[in-house]
Image: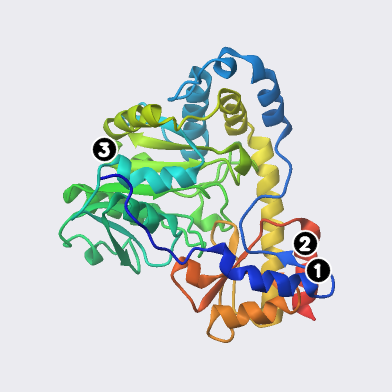
Protein backbone atom coordinates (compact mmCIF):
# COMPACT_ATOMS: atom_id res chain seq x y z
CA UNK A 1 0.00 0.00 0.00
CA UNK A 2 1.04 3.62 -0.28
CA UNK A 3 3.36 5.05 -2.87
CA UNK A 4 5.31 2.55 -4.92
CA UNK A 5 8.87 3.04 -6.11
CA UNK A 6 9.47 4.86 -9.37
CA UNK A 7 12.27 5.18 -11.88
CA UNK A 8 12.84 7.93 -14.40
CA UNK A 9 15.57 9.39 -16.61
CA UNK A 10 14.12 12.83 -15.77
CA UNK A 11 17.01 14.01 -13.60
CA UNK A 12 18.23 17.56 -14.19
CA UNK A 13 21.45 16.86 -12.29
CA UNK A 14 22.53 14.89 -15.36
CA UNK A 15 23.07 18.13 -17.29
CA UNK A 16 25.07 19.84 -14.53
CA UNK A 17 28.40 19.26 -16.27
CA UNK A 18 27.06 20.78 -19.50
CA UNK A 19 25.94 23.84 -17.55
CA UNK A 20 29.42 24.23 -16.08
CA UNK A 21 30.89 24.15 -19.58
CA UNK A 22 28.31 26.65 -20.83
CA UNK A 23 28.98 29.05 -17.95
CA UNK A 24 32.66 29.09 -18.92
CA UNK A 25 31.90 29.97 -22.54
CA UNK A 26 32.38 33.52 -23.85
CA UNK A 27 29.32 35.51 -22.83
CA UNK A 28 28.24 32.93 -20.26
CA UNK A 29 25.40 30.42 -20.24
CA UNK A 30 22.05 30.70 -22.02
CA UNK A 31 19.74 28.15 -20.45
CA UNK A 32 17.09 26.85 -22.85
CA UNK A 33 16.52 23.60 -20.98
CA UNK A 34 13.92 23.93 -18.22
CA UNK A 35 10.66 25.55 -19.32
CA UNK A 36 10.43 28.02 -16.45
CA UNK A 37 8.76 31.39 -17.23
CA UNK A 38 10.86 34.57 -16.95
CA UNK A 39 8.29 37.30 -17.71
CA UNK A 40 6.31 39.42 -15.20
CA UNK A 41 3.20 38.17 -13.48
CA UNK A 42 0.20 40.21 -14.76
CA UNK A 43 -0.66 43.28 -12.68
CA UNK A 44 -4.22 41.98 -12.28
CA UNK A 45 -2.93 38.84 -10.59
CA UNK A 46 -0.59 40.69 -8.24
CA UNK A 47 -3.35 43.10 -7.28
CA UNK A 48 -5.79 40.29 -6.54
CA UNK A 49 -3.19 38.53 -4.40
CA UNK A 50 -2.57 41.65 -2.34
CA UNK A 51 -6.23 42.57 -1.88
CA UNK A 52 -7.15 39.06 -0.71
CA UNK A 53 -4.20 38.67 1.67
CA UNK A 54 -6.42 39.27 4.72
CA UNK A 55 -9.66 37.69 3.54
CA UNK A 56 -11.38 34.88 5.51
CA UNK A 57 -9.98 32.45 2.92
CA UNK A 58 -6.50 33.68 3.94
CA UNK A 59 -6.53 33.82 7.73
CA UNK A 60 -8.86 30.83 7.87
CA UNK A 61 -8.42 27.47 6.17
CA UNK A 62 -8.95 27.80 2.40
CA UNK A 63 -11.70 26.06 0.48
CA UNK A 64 -10.46 22.84 -1.19
CA UNK A 65 -12.85 23.02 -4.14
CA UNK A 66 -12.13 26.72 -4.64
CA UNK A 67 -14.01 29.84 -3.62
CA UNK A 68 -17.27 30.66 -5.36
CA UNK A 69 -15.42 33.36 -7.29
CA UNK A 70 -12.68 30.99 -8.44
CA UNK A 71 -15.23 28.38 -9.48
CA UNK A 72 -17.12 31.04 -11.44
CA UNK A 73 -13.85 32.10 -13.10
CA UNK A 74 -13.09 28.50 -14.11
CA UNK A 75 -16.53 28.12 -15.70
CA UNK A 76 -16.17 31.49 -17.45
CA UNK A 77 -12.72 30.56 -18.75
CA UNK A 78 -13.86 27.22 -20.17
CA UNK A 79 -16.77 28.91 -21.92
CA UNK A 80 -14.73 31.76 -23.38
CA UNK A 81 -11.38 30.11 -24.06
CA UNK A 82 -12.31 26.46 -24.71
CA UNK A 83 -15.89 26.67 -26.01
CA UNK A 84 -17.01 24.38 -23.19
CA UNK A 85 -20.04 24.74 -20.90
CA UNK A 86 -19.01 22.61 -17.91
CA UNK A 87 -22.50 22.49 -16.38
CA UNK A 88 -24.18 21.52 -19.62
CA UNK A 89 -21.94 18.44 -20.08
CA UNK A 90 -22.14 17.32 -16.44
CA UNK A 91 -18.64 18.41 -15.50
CA UNK A 92 -17.14 19.77 -12.31
CA UNK A 93 -13.69 21.19 -11.50
CA UNK A 94 -11.19 21.26 -8.65
CA UNK A 95 -8.09 23.48 -8.39
CA UNK A 96 -4.72 21.76 -7.93
CA UNK A 97 -1.39 22.86 -6.50
CA UNK A 98 0.17 23.14 -9.93
CA UNK A 99 -0.47 20.70 -12.76
CA UNK A 100 2.49 18.44 -11.96
CA UNK A 101 0.95 17.14 -8.75
CA UNK A 102 -2.32 16.69 -10.58
CA UNK A 103 -0.52 14.51 -13.12
CA UNK A 104 1.59 12.66 -10.56
CA UNK A 105 -1.34 11.84 -8.25
CA UNK A 106 -3.88 11.06 -10.97
CA UNK A 107 -3.45 7.28 -11.15
CA UNK A 108 -3.46 7.02 -7.35
CA UNK A 109 -6.58 9.19 -6.97
CA UNK A 110 -8.31 6.98 -9.53
CA UNK A 111 -7.37 3.92 -7.43
CA UNK A 112 -5.30 2.25 -10.13
CA UNK A 113 -2.92 -0.47 -9.01
CA UNK A 114 -1.48 -3.85 -9.83
CA UNK A 115 -2.83 -5.22 -13.11
CA UNK A 116 -4.11 -1.85 -14.29
CA UNK A 117 -2.62 -0.32 -17.44
CA UNK A 118 -2.27 3.39 -18.25
CA UNK A 119 -1.58 4.29 -21.88
CA UNK A 120 0.66 7.24 -22.73
CA UNK A 121 2.61 8.57 -25.73
CA UNK A 122 6.07 7.04 -26.09
CA UNK A 123 7.55 10.54 -26.37
CA UNK A 124 6.03 12.58 -23.57
CA UNK A 125 6.25 14.42 -20.27
CA UNK A 126 7.98 12.00 -17.83
CA UNK A 127 5.55 12.58 -14.94
CA UNK A 128 2.83 10.56 -16.69
CA UNK A 129 4.94 7.43 -16.23
CA UNK A 130 6.10 8.40 -12.74
CA UNK A 131 2.50 8.87 -11.57
CA UNK A 132 1.52 5.46 -12.94
CA UNK A 133 4.49 3.86 -11.20
CA UNK A 134 3.65 5.56 -7.89
CA UNK A 135 0.21 3.94 -8.01
CA UNK A 136 1.72 0.52 -8.69
CA UNK A 137 0.09 0.30 -12.12
CA UNK A 138 1.69 -0.50 -15.47
CA UNK A 139 2.55 1.93 -18.27
CA UNK A 140 1.89 1.14 -21.92
CA UNK A 141 3.80 3.47 -24.24
CA UNK A 142 2.53 3.81 -27.80
CA UNK A 143 3.78 5.81 -30.77
CA UNK A 144 0.45 7.57 -31.25
CA UNK A 145 -2.41 7.50 -28.73
CA UNK A 146 -4.77 8.57 -31.52
CA UNK A 147 -4.13 5.12 -33.05
CA UNK A 148 -6.59 3.34 -30.78
CA UNK A 149 -5.77 -0.03 -32.34
CA UNK A 150 -2.44 0.12 -30.50
CA UNK A 151 -4.12 -0.03 -27.09
CA UNK A 152 -7.85 -0.81 -27.22
CA UNK A 153 -7.45 -4.61 -27.04
CA UNK A 154 -4.74 -4.62 -24.36
CA UNK A 155 -6.08 -6.23 -21.15
CA UNK A 156 -6.34 -3.97 -18.13
CA UNK A 157 -6.33 -0.56 -19.84
CA UNK A 158 -7.90 1.87 -17.38
CA UNK A 159 -6.78 5.27 -18.70
CA UNK A 160 -5.23 7.01 -21.69
CA UNK A 161 -3.02 10.08 -21.37
CA UNK A 162 -3.45 12.67 -24.12
CA UNK A 163 -1.19 15.72 -24.38
CA UNK A 164 -2.14 18.31 -26.98
CA UNK A 165 -0.26 20.54 -27.61
CA UNK A 166 2.48 18.11 -26.71
CA UNK A 167 5.49 18.65 -24.49
CA UNK A 168 8.07 18.17 -25.98
CA UNK A 169 7.11 17.79 -29.66
CA UNK A 170 4.55 20.58 -30.04
CA UNK A 171 2.18 18.25 -31.91
CA UNK A 172 -1.51 19.15 -31.81
CA UNK A 173 -4.31 16.60 -32.17
CA UNK A 174 -7.39 17.45 -34.20
CA UNK A 175 -10.90 17.38 -32.74
CA UNK A 176 -11.57 14.25 -34.81
CA UNK A 177 -8.53 12.47 -33.37
CA UNK A 178 -9.47 13.39 -29.82
CA UNK A 179 -13.08 12.34 -30.35
CA UNK A 180 -11.85 8.96 -31.58
CA UNK A 181 -9.79 8.49 -28.43
CA UNK A 182 -12.76 9.37 -26.21
CA UNK A 183 -15.09 7.07 -28.11
CA UNK A 184 -12.81 4.01 -27.89
CA UNK A 185 -11.79 4.67 -24.28
CA UNK A 186 -15.45 4.75 -23.23
CA UNK A 187 -16.10 1.52 -25.08
CA UNK A 188 -13.50 -0.29 -22.96
CA UNK A 189 -14.28 1.54 -19.70
CA UNK A 190 -11.11 3.65 -19.62
CA UNK A 191 -10.73 7.28 -18.55
CA UNK A 192 -9.29 9.88 -20.94
CA UNK A 193 -6.74 12.08 -19.15
CA UNK A 194 -6.20 15.11 -21.35
CA UNK A 195 -3.25 17.32 -20.40
CA UNK A 196 -4.07 20.64 -22.09
CA UNK A 197 -1.64 22.91 -20.22
CA UNK A 198 -0.45 24.53 -23.46
CA UNK A 199 -3.90 24.85 -25.04
CA UNK A 200 -3.63 28.62 -25.54
CA UNK A 201 -0.10 28.37 -26.94
CA UNK A 202 -0.77 27.41 -30.55
CA UNK A 203 1.07 28.73 -33.58
CA UNK A 204 -0.79 27.52 -36.66
CA UNK A 205 -4.21 28.91 -37.56
CA UNK A 206 -5.29 25.71 -39.24
CA UNK A 207 -5.15 23.78 -35.94
CA UNK A 208 -6.74 26.46 -33.81
CA UNK A 209 -10.24 27.48 -32.91
CA UNK A 210 -9.81 31.23 -33.40
CA UNK A 211 -12.11 33.86 -31.93
CA UNK A 212 -10.75 37.38 -32.28
CA UNK A 213 -12.74 38.53 -29.26
CA UNK A 214 -11.31 35.89 -26.92
CA UNK A 215 -8.35 33.59 -27.44
CA UNK A 216 -7.06 31.12 -29.98
CA UNK A 217 -7.00 27.58 -28.61
CA UNK A 218 -6.57 23.97 -29.65
CA UNK A 219 -9.41 21.40 -29.38
CA UNK A 220 -10.50 20.53 -25.84
CA UNK A 221 -11.46 16.99 -24.80
CA UNK A 222 -14.54 18.45 -23.08
CA UNK A 223 -15.81 20.28 -26.15
CA UNK A 224 -19.18 18.98 -27.27
CA UNK A 225 -17.99 17.74 -30.66
CA UNK A 226 -15.17 15.80 -28.95
CA UNK A 227 -16.92 14.35 -25.89
CA UNK A 228 -20.35 13.98 -27.48
CA UNK A 229 -21.94 16.45 -25.09
CA UNK A 230 -21.06 14.46 -21.96
CA UNK A 231 -18.06 14.64 -19.62
CA UNK A 232 -18.40 10.96 -18.75
CA UNK A 233 -14.97 9.36 -18.45
CA UNK A 234 -13.06 12.51 -19.43
CA UNK A 235 -10.72 14.62 -17.28
CA UNK A 236 -8.88 17.72 -18.50
CA UNK A 237 -5.89 19.33 -16.80
CA UNK A 238 -4.93 22.97 -17.25
CA UNK A 239 -2.34 25.30 -15.71
CA UNK A 240 -1.75 29.05 -15.47
CA UNK A 241 2.03 28.59 -15.25
CA UNK A 242 2.68 29.45 -18.88
CA UNK A 243 -0.35 31.52 -19.91
CA UNK A 244 0.12 33.96 -16.98
CA UNK A 245 3.71 33.33 -15.81
CA UNK A 246 2.36 31.91 -12.55
CA UNK A 247 4.54 28.81 -12.20
CA UNK A 248 5.55 29.81 -8.67
CA UNK A 249 1.92 30.39 -7.67
CA UNK A 250 1.13 26.70 -8.33
CA UNK A 251 -2.24 27.34 -9.93
CA UNK A 252 -3.87 24.64 -12.03
CA UNK A 253 -7.07 22.61 -12.24
CA UNK A 254 -8.71 19.35 -13.16
CA UNK A 255 -12.12 19.50 -14.85
CA UNK A 256 -14.42 16.83 -16.17
CA UNK A 257 -16.63 13.94 -15.12
CA UNK A 258 -18.16 15.07 -11.81
CA UNK A 259 -18.41 11.46 -10.59
CA UNK A 260 -14.59 11.38 -10.70
CA UNK A 261 -13.93 14.97 -9.60
CA UNK A 262 -16.05 14.68 -6.43
CA UNK A 263 -14.05 11.85 -4.81
CA UNK A 264 -10.79 13.47 -5.93
CA UNK A 265 -11.75 16.70 -4.15
CA UNK A 266 -12.59 14.74 -0.99
CA UNK A 267 -9.21 12.99 -0.98
CA UNK A 268 -7.42 16.25 -1.70
CA UNK A 269 -9.10 17.83 1.32
CA UNK A 270 -7.96 15.01 3.59
CA UNK A 271 -4.31 15.15 2.47
CA UNK A 272 -4.14 18.96 2.40
CA UNK A 273 -3.62 19.41 -1.34
CA UNK A 274 -5.27 22.85 -1.27
CA UNK A 275 -4.34 26.09 -3.03
CA UNK A 276 -3.76 28.89 -0.47
CA UNK A 277 -6.69 31.31 -0.20
CA UNK A 278 -4.99 34.45 -1.59
CA UNK A 279 -3.60 32.40 -4.46
CA UNK A 280 -7.12 31.27 -5.32
CA UNK A 281 -8.04 34.93 -5.79
CA UNK A 282 -4.93 35.44 -7.93
CA UNK A 283 -5.86 32.40 -10.02
CA UNK A 284 -9.35 33.79 -10.67
CA UNK A 285 -7.81 37.07 -11.82
CA UNK A 286 -5.39 35.24 -14.12
CA UNK A 287 -8.17 33.23 -15.73
CA UNK A 288 -10.09 36.44 -16.49
CA UNK A 289 -7.20 38.54 -17.80
CA UNK A 290 -7.26 37.64 -21.50
CA UNK A 291 -5.29 40.73 -22.48
CA UNK A 292 -2.31 39.57 -20.42
CA UNK A 293 -2.54 36.10 -21.97
CA UNK A 294 -2.54 37.58 -25.48
CA UNK A 295 0.52 39.67 -24.62
CA UNK A 296 2.36 36.58 -23.40
CA UNK A 297 1.26 34.65 -26.47
CA UNK A 298 2.84 37.28 -28.70
CA UNK A 299 6.08 37.16 -26.72
CA UNK A 300 6.40 33.41 -27.09
CA UNK A 301 5.47 33.46 -30.77
CA UNK A 302 8.27 35.93 -31.53
CA UNK A 303 10.80 34.00 -29.45
CA UNK A 304 9.92 30.70 -31.05
CA UNK A 305 10.21 32.20 -34.53
CA UNK A 306 13.65 33.58 -33.75
CA UNK A 307 14.77 30.32 -32.17
CA UNK A 308 13.56 28.21 -35.09
CA UNK A 309 15.42 30.40 -37.59
CA UNK A 310 18.61 30.25 -35.52
CA UNK A 311 18.47 26.48 -35.12
CA UNK A 312 18.06 26.12 -38.87
CA UNK A 313 21.13 28.31 -39.39
CA UNK A 314 23.03 26.02 -37.02
CA UNK A 315 22.08 23.01 -39.13
CA UNK A 316 19.01 21.56 -37.47
CA UNK A 317 16.03 20.59 -39.61
CA UNK A 318 13.05 22.13 -37.89
CA UNK A 319 9.89 24.19 -38.32
CA UNK A 320 7.68 26.28 -36.08
CA UNK A 321 5.89 23.90 -33.68
CA UNK A 322 2.14 23.57 -33.93
CA UNK A 323 1.83 24.37 -30.24
CA UNK A 324 3.51 24.51 -26.81
CA UNK A 325 6.71 26.41 -26.06
CA UNK A 326 9.49 24.19 -27.33
CA UNK A 327 11.45 23.45 -30.47
CA UNK A 328 11.99 19.70 -30.84
CA UNK A 329 14.91 18.79 -33.09
CA UNK A 330 16.73 15.64 -34.14
CA UNK A 331 20.32 15.64 -32.89
CA UNK A 332 22.83 16.35 -35.65
CA UNK A 333 25.17 13.74 -34.19
CA UNK A 334 22.35 11.25 -33.67
CA UNK A 335 22.80 11.44 -29.89
CA UNK A 336 21.34 14.16 -27.66
CA UNK A 337 24.28 14.08 -25.24
CA UNK A 338 26.89 14.68 -27.94
CA UNK A 339 24.89 17.60 -29.29
CA UNK A 340 24.53 18.94 -25.75
CA UNK A 341 28.31 18.84 -25.39
CA UNK A 342 28.83 20.80 -28.61
CA UNK A 343 26.16 23.36 -27.74
CA UNK A 344 27.60 23.85 -24.25
CA UNK A 345 30.88 24.94 -25.81
CA UNK A 346 29.11 28.01 -27.22
CA UNK A 347 27.25 28.56 -23.96
CA UNK A 348 23.85 27.07 -24.85
CA UNK A 349 22.10 24.41 -22.77
CA UNK A 350 19.14 22.46 -24.15
CA UNK A 351 17.13 19.60 -22.69
CA UNK A 352 18.15 16.04 -23.65
CA UNK A 353 15.50 14.14 -25.56
CA UNK A 354 16.25 11.09 -23.44
CA UNK A 355 14.27 12.75 -20.64
CA UNK A 356 11.17 12.46 -22.83
CA UNK A 357 11.81 9.02 -24.30
CA UNK A 358 13.76 10.01 -27.45
CA UNK A 359 17.56 10.08 -26.93
CA UNK A 360 18.13 11.08 -30.54
CA UNK A 361 16.35 14.43 -30.04
CA UNK A 362 16.78 17.69 -28.11
CA UNK A 363 14.28 20.18 -26.76
CA UNK A 364 14.91 23.93 -26.79
CA UNK A 365 12.65 26.05 -24.58
CA UNK A 366 11.39 29.51 -25.56
CA UNK A 367 10.82 30.37 -21.90
CA UNK A 368 13.81 32.70 -21.84
CA UNK A 369 14.05 36.48 -22.10
CA UNK A 370 14.10 38.30 -25.43
CA UNK A 371 17.75 39.17 -24.81
CA UNK A 372 18.67 35.55 -24.05
CA UNK A 373 16.90 34.24 -27.16
CA UNK A 374 18.56 36.93 -29.31
CA UNK A 375 21.97 36.06 -27.88
CA UNK A 376 21.39 32.36 -28.48
CA UNK A 377 20.35 33.10 -32.06
CA UNK A 378 23.54 35.09 -32.60
CA UNK A 379 25.73 32.28 -31.31
CA UNK A 380 23.92 29.60 -33.29
CA UNK A 381 24.27 31.61 -36.50
CA UNK A 382 28.06 32.05 -36.24
Q: Among all residues in the image, which is located at the extreme bottom?
A: 333
Q: Is residue 238 above or below residue 150?
A: above
Way the structure is coloured: rainbow
Which is more N-terminal, label 1 or label 2?
1
Q: Name the spot of residue 182 as percent of width and height, x first.
A: 28, 49
Residue 148 located left or right of residue 337 = left
Residue 8 located left or right of residue 260 = right
Between marks 1 and 3 in the image, the one whose residue lies nearer the viewer: 1
Q: Name the spot of residue 244 as percent of width and height, x first.
A: 64, 40
For the residue pair 29 and 148, the one nearer the viewer reads as 29
Between marks 2 and 1 in the image, the one whose residue lies nearer the viewer: 1
SS type, badge 1: loop
Q: From mark 2 to mark 1, how far is it between C-alphas?
A: 11 Å
Which is more N-terminal, label 3 or label 1?
1
Q: Is residue 206 above or below residue 271?
A: below
Q: From mark 1 to mark 3, how far is it between C-alphas?
A: 52 Å
Residue labelled with disc 2: 372
Q: Residues within 10 Å of mark 3 (few under 14, many from 20)?
A: many
Residue labelled with disc 3: 232
Amino acid sequence: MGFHEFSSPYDWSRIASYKRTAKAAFGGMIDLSVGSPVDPVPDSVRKALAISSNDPNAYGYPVTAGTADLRDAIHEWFAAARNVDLREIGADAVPTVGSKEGVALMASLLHFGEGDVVVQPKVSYPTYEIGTQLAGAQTLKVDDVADADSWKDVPGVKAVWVNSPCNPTGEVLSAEQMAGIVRVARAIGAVVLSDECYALMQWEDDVAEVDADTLASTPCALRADVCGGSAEGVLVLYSLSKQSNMAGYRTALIAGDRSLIGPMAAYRKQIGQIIPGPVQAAMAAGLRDFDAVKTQHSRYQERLGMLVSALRAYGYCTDMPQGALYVWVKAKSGDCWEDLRQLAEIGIVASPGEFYGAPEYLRFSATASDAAIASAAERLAR
